[in-house]
Image (tube, rainbow, N blue to C red):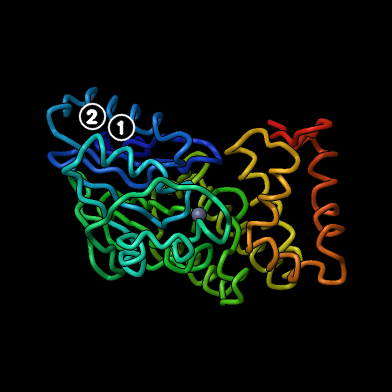
Amino acid sequence: MPALPPDLIVCERDWLSSNNLLCLGDAPAVIDTGHVKAAGDTLRLVRQHLQEQALGQHPLARIAHTHLHSDHCGGTGALQKAWPGAETWVPQPSLADVHNWDEAALSFGDTAQRCDRFGAQHALVPGHTVRLGARDWDIHAAPGHDNLAVLLFQPNTGVLMAGDAMWEHGVGVIFPHIDGVAGFEPFLHTLELIERLAPRVVVPGHGALFTRDNGALDAALARARSRVQYFIDHPAQHAAYAAKVLIKYQMLDVEAMALADFHAWLEAAPALRKLHQQHRPDLGWHDWLESLLAPLFDKGVLRRTATHVLDGA
Ligand SMILES: [Zn+2]
């Protein structure tokens, strides 16, 4: 039995752009739209799949989001321009913030990340269902990585669109914890929810899909639990991990920055200030940054020249 029915198509992307799940049918939909840098690729992928399925005459009808991090909603504006009639769905607590485009509330401000403005008309409410493509999807709250995130579960096919609530290897940054809000325990509860749902196929926010029957789901749950437990026991290590992820992500976006711009960006990301306090408050800001950056340069995650810092990829 193929992992996915023919009306569900995963576009596996990379670490800057989230995966996209196309839900085909009379009213085609897409879940998550990648990073703004790759919005052109997202548009091309959606268009290509609609045409291949002879659905080119059906415009994209719905755009839904597991959560509103910049790597999951950066293509939404471009898709809305291409298909102005598409209805856009976001987790309920974010609907007003999208209307007002409150960048601080939407997380782009705190992380100094960029995202194209888009509109939204509908709320994804846990406990309700949403029609995407040819199927109804159950909406579940999925706090932890992002306390406003939702999971979308399709019970007839057993397909779970997990967003960043679950990856096959490792766990994402637990953003609520950076703001001093509970995140670790909610993350564990979300993993329990996933275990209860027992999805046949998990489409993660990043990386390849994985399945239950070959044991990959159980192995992934065990890895994720032990990683979150490690963060509970060593919260400073979560702060170091989060700071490195934010820096690497920024460099994946811009690829190269003049040294002065790089330092200006570090100063302009309030999340990094909080992570400094959570990781090594005993170090001064500049010493702390150097302690984080040195291993990134040593390992080739980042490179530097006399004038610029560059992504190491
Ligand atoms: Zn995320």
Q: Which quarter shows the C terminus?
A: top right
Assess disc 2: are there few (<14), some (14-19) or many (≥20) residues with their C-alpha within 10 Å of its C-alpha.
many
Which SS class for mark 2? helix
Q: Amino acid at mark 1?
A: Val
Give the x, y percent position of residue 19.
Answer: 44, 41
Is residue 121 left or right of 195 when viewed as pictured?
Answer: left
Question: On residue 46, which mark appears?
Answer: 1
Badge 2 residue CB within 8 Å of ligand 1: no
Q: Secondary structure at mark 1?
A: helix
- Residue 60 in the image: x percent, y percent? 21, 38
Q: Residue at x 50, y 47 (%)?
A: 114
Taking the spot 48% from the left edge, 46% from the top edge, the residue there is 71
Foreground residue among 142 and 32: 32
Which disc is residue 50 wearing?
A: 2
- Looking at the rendered image, the quarter that the N terminus falls into is top left
Residue 212 falls left or right of residue 79: right
Left or right: residue 256 compared with residue 104: right
Residue 307 figure quarter: top right
Label 2–label 1 contact, CB within 8 A? yes
Residue 225: where, in percent of width, then height?
A: 61, 64
Find the distance from the CA under tag 2 to the CA under tag 1.
6 Å
